[in-house]
Image (cartoon, rainbow, N blue to C red):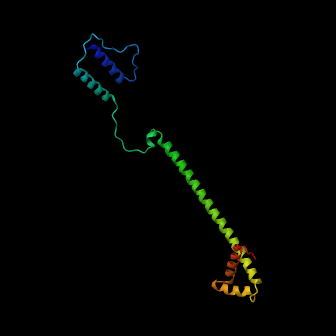
Amino acid sequence: MSELDDLLSQLKAEYTNQEEPQSMTKSPIIPSKTTPKPTCSSVDNLLTQLKGEIKDNQPQPTTSKKTSSHSRFTSPVEPNLFQELRSEYQDKDQIEAERQQQEIKEKQRLNEQRDQKKQKALKEKAQNWLKQLNSKSDEGKWFEEFSYSYDSKIEAAMQYLEALRESGMNI
């Protein structure tokens, strides 16, 4: 029975003193054939006792509030670093978004300027065309009827010249 006690104490020492390495010089005690076999109830009692001691040595899980996934990777000292990094990246993102907005506004402004220049050039061309238009010619008579649906003859001439340009019949 003492051999079982020795074996049990070795197991106990192994599980309770994990920091202390088990001596490799001791060989495990194997019951000899001459020793009587222990009864089932005593082995069961020893195993139950051993399991209880192992459970007692294990750290108990503590209940904690739900934390975000990043907090389990940071130590208590690191939240400030994490906040600083987050703030830095948010600042960079905000600066980038503002820059993109400025680019979009600049493109819109340039497009408006280009459209205004086109309209101005088209208006000048329409004024010249109207000056050269003979109101007694077929084209002049046709244009007179055409311009009734517009607020002004300049606007009608601009529309007419634009339609000619798009159809490839530039004047």
Going 72% across and 79% down the picture, which residue do you hit?
Answer: 126
Residue 124 vertical placement versus 61 (above, below): below
Going 74% across and 83% down the picture, which residue do you hit?
Answer: 130
Q: Quadrant of the C terminus?
A: bottom right
Between residue 139 and residue 14, name the one nearer to us.
Answer: 139
Image quadrant where residue 50 sits: top left
Going 65% across and 86% down the picture, which residue do you hit?
Answer: 148
Residue 82: image x %, image y %? Answer: 49, 43
Image quadrant where residue 3 sits: top left
Residue 94: image x %, image y %? Answer: 55, 54
The residue at the far top in this view is 34
How many marks can you see?
A: 0
Image quadrant where residue 109 sits: bottom right
Residue 107 vertical placement versus 34 (above, below): below
Residue 19 vertical placement versus 100 (above, below): above
Q: Quadrant of the N terminus?
A: top left
